[in-house]
Amino acid sequence: MNILEKITQNQAAFSKSEKKVAEVILANPQTAIHSSIATLAKMSDVSEPTVNRFCRRLDTKGFPDFKLHLAQSLANGTPYVNRHVDENDSPDEYTNKIFESTMASLEVARQSVDVNVVNRVVDLLTQAQKISFFGLGASASVAHDALNKFFRFNVPVVYFEDILMQRMSCMNCSAGDVVVLISHTGRTKSLVEIAQIARMNDATVVGITSADSPLAQECSYVLSLEVPEDTDMYMPMASRIAQLTLIDVLATGFTLRRGNKFRENLKRVKDTLRGSRYEKRGD
Amino acid sequence: MNILEKITQNQAAFSKSEKKVAEVILANPQTAIHSSIATLAKMSDVSEPTVNRFCRRLDTKGFPDFKLHLAQSLANGTPYVNRHVDENDSPDEYTNKIFESTMASLEVARQSVDVNVVNRVVDLLTQAQKISFFGLGASASVAHDALNKFFRFNVPVVYFEDILMQRMSCMNCSAGDVVVLISHTGRTKSLVEIAQIARMNDATVVGITSADSPLAQECSYVLSLEVPEDTDMYMPMASRIAQLTLIDVLATGFTLRRGNKFRENLKRVKDTLRGSRYEKRGD
DNA sequence: ACACCAAATGTAGTAAAATTACAACTTGAA
DNA sequence: TTCAAGTTGTAATTTTACTACATTTGGTGT
């Protein structure tokens, strides 16, 4: 609870000298947090213990603790909110809105992730014979990205954009194979069918999708992400970002599970790229 | 500027004992602001003056002032910091760390974006005869995503993963064509070459890349994103997300510039998908 | 390998700040 | 007026932070 508000509210209940202290603090809180109890006492024309008592009345442990609370109240605290882009927004406005909305969505997504399922899925992935990533439309690029990540782990990874290739690939699945299906809505028919095919062939199907969707029902494990999507734009935006971040989480879990020696491996993969790059001054 | 971020960023510049202090603070900042310099010193296993020096290195007046700054950082303004994943992190821990780091990176990216360039690029894109999106490795999936977005605008969009196709495509460029090249480092040789080819053929080249990189120097316009990347993971993570968000910004700018009637168009594109989906109860 | 320097860290003493205990007021009711 | 409850201030105590200086560490050139 904001302590500045608290001061204003309780102002009536304060004693005469306490009111003086409150006044000085409210008049210039920025100065207050940088003053010692002595200076503040002098400014308010009261004694030091009075200031101290004032702090305690506001349920703080003492003057330093009070300053901490005050500092927090003063921190320009507007957490990220999902703000919709308006038709007349300037470039500056829509740029900021989109970045902020994306951050807000990530925060929501973070809270909706079931860590236990993440853990189980990481388990599965580390033990998988073959990992497939499939998605359609906007989710295709997420699957594409997952390929790029998991490919580095030197495990058999599969990714297709073509729906027929996806189907064929799933036809050839067997026990030990993991198929990761990505879809924001979880209502894309072809992807649901692919889930069915994969499961019929004993693969474990992991869905990165919305809970309770038709796709979710066909999956062995569901990593559900509840992401508010700005439907005004008629484009998936935040959902992809959340999906990608979840892919990052899975990839990270994978490397951690595989241990230190494995990390060396990743470094080697990265170092291989060096030849294809212009050197940076100093390395 | 958020002091928690500052700690994370400067971590490399700290001395051995200062790093210990940084670790303890980052591990549990809430405890830190309620501790005295003595307790914090003990927790970090260093002497009190070391903690004091640590505070001064971060441009604070001393320990109490440092606590004030820390308290402000912790207040719900910008709670997200780039925290590195640790080997012994539980699934819960690394999941949260990655989400938070991603959000923190987006915040940094947002501040590094030059809105004027965004505006100019949106201008270019709306007037382009043909738009191409190229990236390699991790950035390929970003280009892929851009394709998916701009494709809906009913403008000629091109995207290739294959480097030869990219080159050939650029060979056929002419004035009025816009080539968007995506690369975190901006040091990938083949992409720099593509920039050169495109420009030789009168195309306008837009780089979504690091400022001052070889690629940036070959571009007509540079949308630079300064994103801190956790090099421990040997994988691009935050940079892609920032790039994608920037693509969202461009796409949004595009639709806004095109006006209301155009939005109808997008709605139609989206509605077309309906046939391929399972209906949701109630729509 | 050694000496030497600079940077880093710690020790111990000092100064400052906050808190406590208690004394001296103020105020209002009997 | 007098007493009691509540308020405020003074002075001593304790806690906290800081400074000056000593010791250690690590690196560099001979």
Image (cartoon, coloured by chain):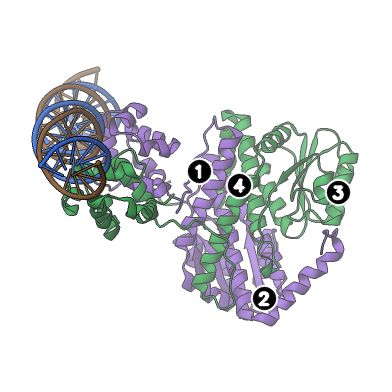
Chain colours: A green, B purple, C brown, D blue
Q: Which residue position holds label 2?
A: B130
Pointers 3 and 4 in contact (C-beta within 8 Å)? no
Give the distance between the C-alpha atoms of the residues marked 1 and 3, in whole angstroms.
Answer: 36 Å
Which comes before the other along the chain, label 1 or label 2? 2
Give the distance between the C-alpha atoms of the residues marked 1 and 2, in whole angstroms.
Answer: 36 Å
Three-letter amino acid code of the residue under disc 4: Arg
Residue B231 disc label: 1
Above or below for A207 versus B216: above
Q: Position of residue A220 (x, y in %)?
A: 80, 39
Which comes before the other along the chain, label 3 or label 4? 4
Direction from residue A139 to residue B238 in the image, left or right: left
Q: Nearer the viewer, residue A40 or A100?
A: A40
SS for tag 1? Answer: helix
Q: Chain ID for label 4? A: A
Three-letter amino acid code of the residue under disc 3: Ile
Q: Chain ID for label 2? A: B
SS for tag 2? Answer: strand
Q: Residue at x 18, y 54 (%)?
A: A43
Do badges 4 and 2 share one subunit?
A: no
- Callout 4 crowding tier (Cα within 10 Å): few <14, some 14–19, many ≥20: many
Mark nearer the viewer, 2 or 3: 3
Three-letter amino acid code of the residue under disc 2: Lys
Residue A128 disc label: none
Q: Nearer the viewer, residue D14 or B40?
A: D14
